[in-house]
Amino acid sequence: TEPSSYESAEINLVSYSINEAPDVHLKVTDMKGQLVWSQVTDNFPCTWPLTDNNGQRVKPGLYKIHGNYQSNESYGGTNIVNFVVLNPLGN
């Protein structure tokens, strides 16, 4: 996961073992493990706009991003990735 700008983060998943693009349930949690943002998609890269599920900009801090997927009879998930959100420049 790499920041694509100061206002969003680009999330890209690549699988070499699945022949189709599965629906992936992406989740962002705060350090307390509480869900901040989620999205179901099969289109990658996906953009997290650094907002919560209510559209409010998240506070600076450490977040965790991971995904779970199902493809036919295959189930799996990604590693949990730590992601740091900083204050925008000038704030």
Image: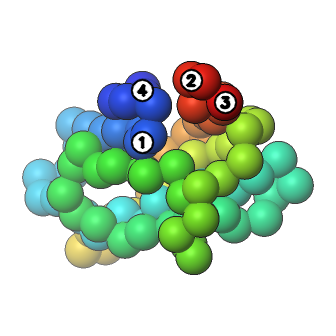
**Name of the residue lying farthest toward the left:** 19
Residue 71 in view, yes or no: yes
- Using the numbered discs, state the Cα–Cα distance from disc 1 to disc 4 in whole angstroms: 9 Å
Depth check, mark 4 against mark 2: the one in front is 2
N-term-proximal mark, 1 vs 3: 1
N-term-proximal mark, 4 vs 2: 4
- Report the disc number at residue 2: 4
Q: In this image, 28 relative to 18: left or right?
A: right
Depth check, mark 1 against mark 3: the one in front is 3
What residue appears at the point 66 percent right and 63 percent down from the top-left corner?
A: 36
Check disc 1 and report the residue beneath it: 8
Check disc 2 and report the residue beneath it: 89
Task: Tell me which amino acid carries mark 4.
Answer: Glu
Q: Rate crowding at label 1 as few (under 14), some (14 to 19) or many (20 or more) other CA atoms within 10 Å.
A: some
Q: Secondary structure at mark 1?
A: strand
Check disc 3 and report the residue beneath it: 91
Q: Rate crowding at label 3 as few (under 14), some (14 to 19) or many (20 or more) other CA atoms within 10 Å.
A: few
Q: Position of residue 61 (x, y in %)?
A: 76, 37
Task: Tell me which amino acid carries mark 1.
Answer: Ser
